[in-house]
């Protein structure tokens, strides 16, 4: 099977119309409508998405920093 070059693969993945961002923003919007009876503004949706991405990155950093301590304590 032929695989496209790495840069072409990256473009294909980046142009995927069904990214997690769409699903997460849709979830946020549905939840907001259920709670408050009106859809999210674009600014609020962007703020919530930015917080989600930031928290995910911070979690990855904390996990990477703590993995050596955990493996020493519990073993591999």
Image: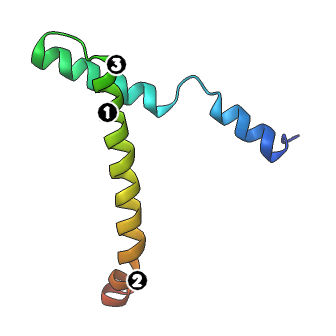
Toward the front, the furthest residue is 43
Q: Which residue is tagged 1?
A: 47
Q: Report which quarter residue 14 is drawn in.
A: top right
Q: Which residue is denoted by mark 3 in the rendering?
A: 42
* Residue at point 20%, 22% (across, down): 31
- Element assignment for label 2: helix
Please tell me whether mark 3 sits on a helix, a strand or a loop: helix
Q: Relative to 29, does residue 60 appear above or below in the rendering?
A: below
Q: Of circles 1 and 2, which is in front?
A: 1
| Residue 5 point in image, percent of width and height | 85, 44
On screen, residue 35 versus residue 55, left or right, reads left
In the picture of the structure, the residue carrying the numbered disc 2 is: 68
Q: Residues within 10 Å of mark 3 (few under 14, many from 20)?
A: few
The answer to which of 74 and 61 lies nearer the viewer is 61
**Gap in Å between the C-alphas at discs 3 and 2?**
41 Å
Tell me which corner region of the image, top left, top right, bottom left or bottom right, holds residue 41: top left
Q: Is residue 58 above or below residue 11?
A: below
The spot of residue 67 in percent (x, y) is 39, 77
Give the left or right position of residue 57, taking residue 74 as reference: right
Residue under the image location 35 percent in, 76 percent down: 66
* Circle 1 SS class: helix
Circle 2 crowding by C-alpha within 10 Å: few under 14, some 14–19, many from 20: few
Label 1 vs label 3: CA separation? 9 Å
Residues at badges 3 and 2 in contact (C-beta under 8 Å)? no
Callout count:
3
């Amino acid at each position: 099977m032929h695989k496209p070059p790495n840069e072409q693969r990256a473009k294909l993945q980046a142009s995927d119309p069904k990214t997690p961002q769409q699903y997460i923003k849709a979830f946020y919007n549905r939840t907001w409508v259920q709670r408050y009876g009106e859809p999210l503004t674009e600014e609020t949706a962007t703020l919530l998405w930015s917080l989600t991405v930031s928290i995910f990155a911070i979690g990855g950093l904390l996990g990477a920093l703590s993995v050596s301590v955990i493996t020493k304590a519990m073993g591999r």
